[in-house]
Amino acid sequence: MIAVPKVFARSTVEREGEPGAAWLAGLPGIVDELLARWGCVADGEVMHGGVGVIVPVRRRDTGAAVLKVSFPHPGNVHEPDAFAAWGGRGAVLLYERDDDRFAMLLERGHTSTLAEVADGDEVVTVAGRISRRLAVPAPLGLPRLRDRADDWEEQLRKDAAELTHVLTRDVVDAAVATVRELGRVQPDVLIHGDLHAGNILRADREGWLAIDPKGYAGDPAYDGGTLLKSRALTLLGADDPRKAVHRVLDVFAEAAELDRGDVQRWAQFHAVQAAFWGRRHGFRMGRSGSQADWLIEFADRLAELLTEP
């Protein structure tokens, strides 16, 4: 049986409580069952992400692969649907799936990610090209981001009214306008939904492959916003933050073949959401205290920069 990583076990219980503890207790048995069913043998140390374990395995027909088993959560439901629709186009291949177990057998990439690349332009270019390749017609049954537009607008207005913040009315209004003008008319295109450099692995079949998709149907420019938000600390630490932010927008839009203005608007929307979310819930990197305050200031500054022409 596998040994569940202690850090993963602790964070799962802290986040999920008793249901998380119960799932962890049964996890080694689930892994053993799936290894036997899919004809795999363990082939390395167990790794983990935020919500699941990743077991390197080998199987006679596919060779090196990974078994991923995630804690059951609505946000993980459509991950295998996205992989199936892509069929290896810009993302790792899906070999097997067990939706009841929230488990998949996937192509194995390298352990290094795009986040380890020092050249910022290369990071953004690769992410943009991946985004373009992932933009295929979305299967029926995937969540449509346009259906969230009303909730997005309601939450933005609620946050602006209830929270103590320094965002100007122009900044908040710009985010609301994006929801109204772009959010309700999004195409039926499959997008990653959580595109950032840590979710793009070096690989052998192709140079880079995406992992951990949410599996949404929506505007591919939405993913430009998630990417830029993930690079906020690097961008705002630059000598000229405004220039650095707009460079990312330019490079990503060109590589992804997207409208540059739409990428900026979605990025601004993501930044405003993050500024309000941080005030209500904190961030993974800092739930409270001075670190959370510092991250909120970063989100505020990014939202302001992205509101400017």
Image: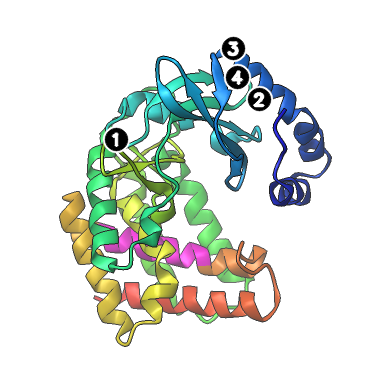
Q: CA distance from mark 1 to mark 4?
A: 34 Å
Which residue matches tag 3?
Answer: 37
Q: Nearer the viewer, residue 209 or 164?
A: 209
Asked whether 270 falls inside the magenta stretch, the response is yes
Magenta residues (range): 263-274
The residue mark sitting in front, 3 or 1, is 3
Disc assigned to residue 189: 1
> 10 Å neighbourhood of mark 1: few (<14), some, or many (≥20)?
some
Which residue matches tag 2?
Answer: 31
Q: Are marks 3 and 2 in contact (CB under 8 Å)?
A: no
Disc assigned to residue 35: 4
The picture places residue 264, in percent across and down from the top left corner, at 28, 64
Q: Are marks 3 and 4 in contact (CB under 8 Å)?
A: yes
Q: Are marks 2 and 4 in contact (CB under 8 Å)?
A: yes
**As shown in the figure, which amino acid type bears the numbered disc 2?**
Val
**As shown in the figure, which amino acid type bears the numbered disc 3?**
Arg
Residue visible at 36% across and 63% down in the picture = 228
Residue visible at 25% across and 53% down in the picture = 126
Q: From the viewer's perspective, is residue 31 above or below residue 241?
A: above
Would residue 51 appear left or right of 151 to someone viewing this image? Answer: right
Q: CA distance from mark 3 to mark 1?
A: 34 Å
Q: Nearer the viewer, residue 227 or 173?
A: 227
Asked whether 259 falls inside the magenta stretch, the response is no
Q: Earlier in the sequence, mark 3 or mark 1?
A: 3
